[in-house]
Image (spheres, rainbow, N blue to C red):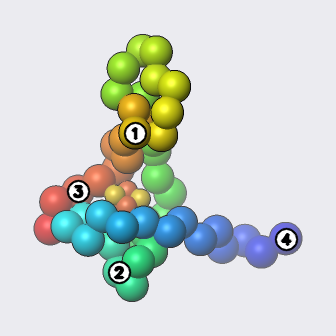
Amino acid sequence: MNAESVVKCGVNTCTYWKDMRCHAQSIEVNPKTPTAKTSAETECTTFKSR
Ligand code: SF4
């Protein structure tokens, strides 16, 4: 298996973003509410503003 995973991301204001991809070594995603049921109710905790 390829050791390098690809995370597509559209958050171009993030430090780790380049060419529509995430370049962080790992990311953490968490629910915005305790009852999240759609992707819109989740968020990338690793996001860091440029
Ligand atoms: S850390 Fe999160 S928001 Fe930032 S580029 Fe990676 S996936 Fe996107």
Give the residue pinned by disc 4: 1
Rendered residue at 16%/60% (across/down): 49
Which one is in front in this view, the residue at disc 1 or the one at disc 4? Answer: 1
Sequence-earlier tag: 1 or 4: 4
Q: Secondary structure at mark 2?
A: strand
**Type of residue at label 3?**
Lys
Tell me which numbered mark, 1 or 2, is placed earlier along the sequence. 2
Distance (Cα) linking label 3 and label 4: 29 Å
Q: Is mark 2 within 8 Å of ligand 1?
A: no
> Is 11 displayed left or right of 19 in the figure?
left
User: Disc 2 designates what residue?
Assistant: 18
Q: Which residue is mark 1?
A: 40
Cβ of disc 4 within 8 Å of ligand 1?
Answer: no
**Label whose residue precedes the other's in the sequence (2 or 3):** 2
Q: Is residue 30 above or below residue 44?
A: above
Using residue 17 as the reference point, say whether residue 36 is left or right of it: right
The relative height of residue 41 versus residue 9 in the rendered view (above or below) is: above
Q: Residue at x 30, y 64 (%)?
A: 11
Question: Can you give x and y, in whole percent of width and height, for residue 34 in the image?
Answer: 42, 15
Q: CA distance from mark 4 to mark 2?
A: 24 Å
Determine crowd level at label 4: few under 14, some 14-19, many 20+ residues with C-alpha closer than 10 A.
Answer: few
Residue position marked by numbered label 3 in the rendering:
48
